[in-house]
Image: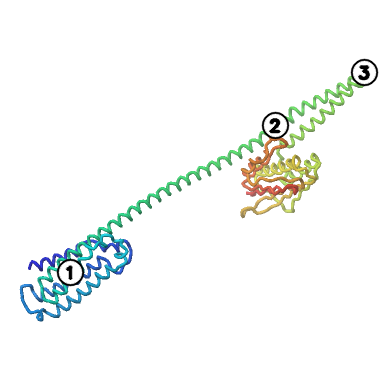
């Protein structure tokens, strides 16, 4: 009965031992694993129970009366188990040496002789030897399962560490992405604040220009007019009392200088003071600008405005920015281009799927290497450099186009003239 108890205890031990085996733990498919070998042995134990029940150890019978049906089933189960052991020993996992403990001879080399002895004991009808040998095989399989479970735990621990490393990398990348997002958001906010500040500066400049124009017109120009009147009074009083005519010559020169100075001041006032867009449209303001430019610079200037053109949806302050852009472009032609002819084209267009205003200012001058962006203006010559009139006006143009929310581009080559292209949304 003790042998039967050991047999039942061995079956229970195999049932309670952990794991589906290393192969299952690693996700690698192998022809046979230690767990599968143990499953085959459990089938063998079932047939062994049937064999022992058919032939108790205490009963002594000749081998030919040993219960052939039970012995044949037991031998068949043993043959199946032996094949599973051979399959495991020939499996890629075992042969590759990845299961290092299983590659040791003292671990796997003992079970094959035990299987041969068990087969001989069954054929000889030695029930006691059968039970003893099955116990030995059961111990070897328990070692197999223990090693398989330990290896699975080791591999799982390695995977766990890899998982921790992966999670750490993901956390680090998430923090970096978050920091980049915060930095981009701060840069975006700063960009908006900078654009708003630039807009307020430009609008403040327009107010200051209007104030200066009024001051020049109401104070300096008026005082010069008074001085011119006093010079006329001197000429009247001297009259024939100046036989040499020296006083009259001096007064005439002074009067002419006053007249020219007043004309210049009024021209400056006209440049400083913004057009009155409430009484005229952008097109009319640009026509007058081109007329004044041609008269002052001696450069032929034509303006083309198609029929049906309208800048009505654009606010007055934005129209003023467009006017200043054209004014600065013409001023650059006058100062730098050495052109004989200038053309201004004004028409409605499309910008980003929205109605927009397109203004092109062209000349046939000497051209230059144009900037491609506002940041590119830093390479342009400064007034401190020799033979350079400066290009602060172009930087100011980029500031104004940023207020408009449009696009400014320069198309030019050395000796091929220049085209300034201004695109500004109407709304």
Residue 245's label in the rendered image is none
Task: Name the spot of residue 152 as percent of width and height, x first.
Answer: 28, 59
User: From mark 1 to mark 2, how far is it between C-alphas?
Assistant: 114 Å
Label 2 CA crowd tier, 10 Å (few <14, some 14–19, many 20+): some
Single out the mark in the foreground, 3 or 1.
1
User: From mark 3 to mark 2, how far is it between C-alphas?
Assistant: 43 Å
Task: Name the spot of residue 59 as percent of width and height, x first.
Answer: 5, 75
Task: Name the spot of residue 199 as percent of width and height, x first.
Answer: 61, 40
Residue in the picture at 69% in, 50% down: 358
Query: How many labels, in total?
Result: 3
- Residue occupying the far top of the picture: 241
* Above-or-below relation of 37 to 407: below
- Residue occupying the far front of the picture: 105
Q: Mark 2 highlights which residue?
A: 212
Task: Name the spot of residue 98 as percent of width and height, x first.
Answer: 31, 61
Q: Which secondary structure, mark 2?
A: helix
Q: Is residue 423 left or right of residue 158?
A: right
Q: Is residue 140 left or right of residue 234?
A: left
Closest to the observer, 10 or 243: 10
Q: Mark 1 highlights which residue?
A: 114
Closest to the observer, 89 or 301: 89
Residue 241's label in the rendered image is 3
* Above-or-below relation of 167 to 235: below
Label 3 CA crowd tier, 10 Å (few <14, some 14–19, many 20+): few
Single out the mark in the foreground, 1 or 2.
1
Disc nearer the start of the sequence (3/1): 1
Disc nearer the start of the sequence (3/2): 2
State the image quarter where residue 203 is shown: top right
Label 1 CA crowd tier, 10 Å (few <14, some 14–19, many 20+): some
Labels 3 & 1 near each other (Cβ < 8 A)? no
* Above-or-below relation of 31 to 237: below
Q: Which secondary structure, mark 1?
A: helix
């Amino acid at each position: 009965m003790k042998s039967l108890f050991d047999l039942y205890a061995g079956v229970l031990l195999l049932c309670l031992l952990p794991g589906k085996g290393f192969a299952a733990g690693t996700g690698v498919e192998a022809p046979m694993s230690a767990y599968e070998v143990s499953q085959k042995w459990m089938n063998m134990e079932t047939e062994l129970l049937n064999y022992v029940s058919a032939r108790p150890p205490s009963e002594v019978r000749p081998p030919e009366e040993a219960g052939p049906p039970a012995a044949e089933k037991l031998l068949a189960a043993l043959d199946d188990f032996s094949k599973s052991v051979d399959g495991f020993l020939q499996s890629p996992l075992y042969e590759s040496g990845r299961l290092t403990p299983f590659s040791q001879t003292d671990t796997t080399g003992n079970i094959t002789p035990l299987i041969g002895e068990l087969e001989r004991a069954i054929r000889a009808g030695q029930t006691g030897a059968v039970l003893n040998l099955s116990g030995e095989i059961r111990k070897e399989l328990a070692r197999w399962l223990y090693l398989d479970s330990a290896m699975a735990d080791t591999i799982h621990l390695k995977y766990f560490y890899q998982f921790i490393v992966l999670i750490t990398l993901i956390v680090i990348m998430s923090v970096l992405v978050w920091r980049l997002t915060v930095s981009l958001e701060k840069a975006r906010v700063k960009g908006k604040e900078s654009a708003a500040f630039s807009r307020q500066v430009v609008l403040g400049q327009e107010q200051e220009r209007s104030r200066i124009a009024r001051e020049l017109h109401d104070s300096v120009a008026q005082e010069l007019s008074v001085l011119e009147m006093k010079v006329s009074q001197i000429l009247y009083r001297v009259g024939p009392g100046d036989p040499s005519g020296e006083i009259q010559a001096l007064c005439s020169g002074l009067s002419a200088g006053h007249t020219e100075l007043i004309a210049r001041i009024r021209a400056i006032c006209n440049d400083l003071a913004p057009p009155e867009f409430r009484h005229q449209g952008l097109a009319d303001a640009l026509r007058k600008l081109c007329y004044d430019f041609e008269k002052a610079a001696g450069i032929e200037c034509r303006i083309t405005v198609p029929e049906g053109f309208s800048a009505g949806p654009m606010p007055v302050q934005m129209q003023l920015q467009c006017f200043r852009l054209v004014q600065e472009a013409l001023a650059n032609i006058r100062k730098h281009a050495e052109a004989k002819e200038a053309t201004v084209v004004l028409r409605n267009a499309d910008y980003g799927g929205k109605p927009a205003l397109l203004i092109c200012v062209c000349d046939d001058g000497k051209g230059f290497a144009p900037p491609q962006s506002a940041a590119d203006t830093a390479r342009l010559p400064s007034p401190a450099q020799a033979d350079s009139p400066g290009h602060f006006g172009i930087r100011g143009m980029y500031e104004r186009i940023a207020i408009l929310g449009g696009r400014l581009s320069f198309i030019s080559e050395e000796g091929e003239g220049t085209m300034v292209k201004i695109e500004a949304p109407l709304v």
